Amino acid sequence: MDVHDLPLSHVMQTGLLHCAPATPLREAAQRMTERQCSCILVIENQQALGIWTEHDALGIDFFNQQTRQEPIERHMSSPVATAPMHMRVDEAARLLSSRGHRHLLVTDADDLPVGIVSQTDIALHQGLEPYLRLREVHTAMQSHPLVLDGELLLNDVSEKMRLNQHDAAIVNTSDGLGIVTERDFIGFVALHPGTTSIGQLASRPLHTIAENAPLIQARELLIHHGIRHLAVLDGRHQVSGLIGFRDILMTADHHYLDELRDALEQRDSALAKSRQNLELAERVIESSLEGIIITDAQTRIEFVNPAFTHMTGYTLEEVTGKTPSVLASGRQDERFYQQMWACLQENGYWRGEVWNRRKSGELYLELLTITAITDQDGITQHYAGLFTDITHMRENEEQIRHLAYYDPLTRLPNRRLLEDRLKLAMHHAHRAHEPLALIFIDLDHFKQVNDTLGHAVGDELLMHAADRMRGQLREDDTLARLGGDEFIILLSSIRDFGDATGVAQRIISTISAPYAIDGHEFRVGCSLGISVYPDDGETPTALMHSADAAMYRAKQEGRNTYRLYRAEMDRQAQQHLSLETALRNTLEGHNGIEMHYQPIYNRNTGAIASAESLARWYHPDHGWVSPGTFIPLAERSGLILPLGEHIIDRVLSDINHWRKAGITPPPIAINLSAAQFWQADFIAKVEKKLKDANIDPTLITFELTESMLFERREQGMDVLSQLSALGCRIALDDFGTGYSSLSYLHKMAANSLKIDQSFIAALDDKTHDSRPIVAAISSLAEQLGLSVVAEGVETEQQLALLSQYPIDAIQGFYLSRPLTPADFQALIAT
């Protein structure tokens, strides 16, 4: 049954203290003191004429000794507020509140007095413990306590307390602070004259509590010490207020309980609106998603709800009479439970995380709250435990932590975890006076795999490579992925750099083995850079920088090999940064990049058919910088787009310069980078530049490599069609060096194919004879109606060998090197 539905007969005090109307006031007060009662009924002929309470004692004139001998009927309050014994507790609470009374006389069916109930009796049965835990002492205390000098006389004190409507006052004496309450004045009536100083009568010691303590703790202290009030201390340990049982009870506004009841009704529409019977309370417990377990004072289980059964697998019949240790997992030791029960005994509750075991044997983690349920004397009668299974929550947190420290694709440690491990390894190496090594690994031509076979195959390649590398390492070594195709190996506790080079050789060997992924068979290599602590760096950042620099040197010196860090590598990195800065400044100043033009000759007539524009860069500090240096630099640094814009503008400017000189130039080829080609507004930019320069689009040929189209083939074909629709010509450069696909070649809006110079150079190579390849490419282009350009022709013999194939045009040093705009103008003017 809901506590609010209890009849008064369940909460009232029986064994009434009463007296006759003629009883002297002193005698009545003495009887109240002996019985420690808060009131006495005045009864005549079994009828209650009035009531005299502790509060009424403040109205006594303590100076007048005769007053104490007056009959109590002169001082009693009348009539007495009554209530039938079957009245519900909540109705009695509203009755007391509306009339401003503190007591109700409980009567039986014949209107005879059978007991008395006070505000305190009602509140103690209203189940306020959860509410009190949610609030602190300062929310309920009397913030301006009545503080009196100990020299004040008893009669003056009673008058001050009555006029200020205080039920207690702090007394300041030479011996310290004390307290007097309304209950004390009952004893004063019987024993002390009004001329007694209050300092002699004040109770000591003055019990205290902190402002930020929970209200339930104040309630427990009051009950434990059997007192009515506590002094409240602020952060400086100064008295800032008083709090009594009545203050605590008054803060528990009945409207709050009504709102709480409404909230529970809204949360579960299946609950009935009435919360005044036991069946409704049981439904709330049964529908709760939290497991609930109730034990007796000896921790023997008396009740569990369905959520408990759902989470643990145990039914009520299986655990009744047993202790919660039936769920013990064995993960917590005896000390853990000792601390739990010590906290529970001291504070009345405990909250924390506990590993328990289901009936099936499965472990689970729960968030558990245990509350001690006590009677009016503070003696524990039951323990209530509420718990929630938080196993999945912890698993999710672990997963988040894993994502923060591990690469999601390869499941290897990421940069963050690597740096943590590297710091620890360096501290250990420093203490042990032993070296450690970092190996920086970059897969060779990984981008080509991504571009030609797709990112899915590229991801599979990374996972296969990671598994292969893991198999070559010791258990204590760390393999991490920095991103893309870059990996780092941390080798701790090595003897010398020879251990690191041995690992590097094994890594190169295992990475270089063939891969078979999604029906594709291919090989990739890797370039490795090795740095050793402490010689190549004394911080994680410096050591990684050194390994990175060594890796780049390995790429520069042939790939699929390893290099140890040397000091000049750092100088090369500084030079690289200086060169990037110089290129950026050059592009911003539009001065320093110029175009050279290499003629392309018609093989049959010898006339100039077209020319390829080639960027050349001269810098005052760096001199002539090779395109093989500054073009990759522009791609890595993000300068390729402004460089591409500059190249197109210079070519158009040179064409107009030649036209103004009265020369009709041949079509000029411009090499496109992938970044330029995939710009969303690339076609619009080209169209605008041609229109602004008033140049016929047929004078412009755009050269691009076939590998640029594989990632987004359909979109790339559309871009080429739009360029062709403008009137521009399309040439496929380096044809045959990538993963050529004939399925789309016949659909492509291309005008010519350029056979890569590597095939031309191998025409007379008996070991790697490329003539079948040249024959196949040229024949294919002829059948598709495409013109064929052989680039990189450097010898007379190569030119002669090409005569047997359907080649349309020749380009190479044998016929002409790239020329300055002025020299090219002179050539085409003849």
Image: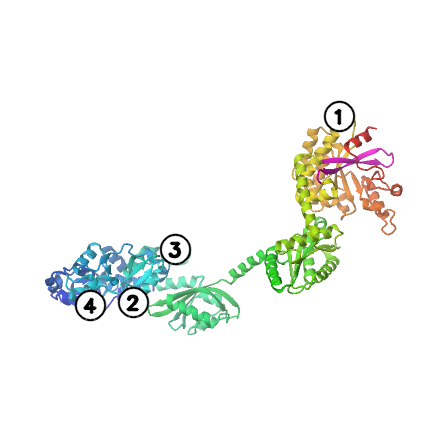
- For marks 3 and 2, give the CA distance: 36 Å
Residue 45 at x, y percent in the picture: 13, 67
**What residue would you read off at disc 4?**
33
Classify mark 4: residues with Cα within 10 Å, few (<14), some (14-19) or many (20+): many
- For marks 4 and 2, give the CA distance: 18 Å
User: Which portion, as a residue range, is magenta?
Assistant: 593-621
Q: Which amino acid does label 1 sit on?
A: Lys
Q: Which of marks 1 and 2 is nearer the N terminus?
A: 2
Q: Does the magenta stretch include residue 29?
A: no
Classify mark 1: residues with Cα within 10 Å, few (<14), some (14-19) or many (20+): few
Q: Earlier in the sequence, mark 4 or mark 1?
A: 4
Point out the frontmost of discs 3 and 1. Answer: 1
Q: Which of marks 3 and 2 is nearer the N terminus?
A: 2
**What residue would you read off at disc 3?**
263
Image quadrant where one finds the C terminus: top right
**What residue would you read off at disc 1?**
660
Choose between 748 and 804: the one closer to the eye: 804
Q: Classify residue 33 as left or right of residue 501.
A: left
Q: Eyeballing the image, is 716 above or below 98?
A: above
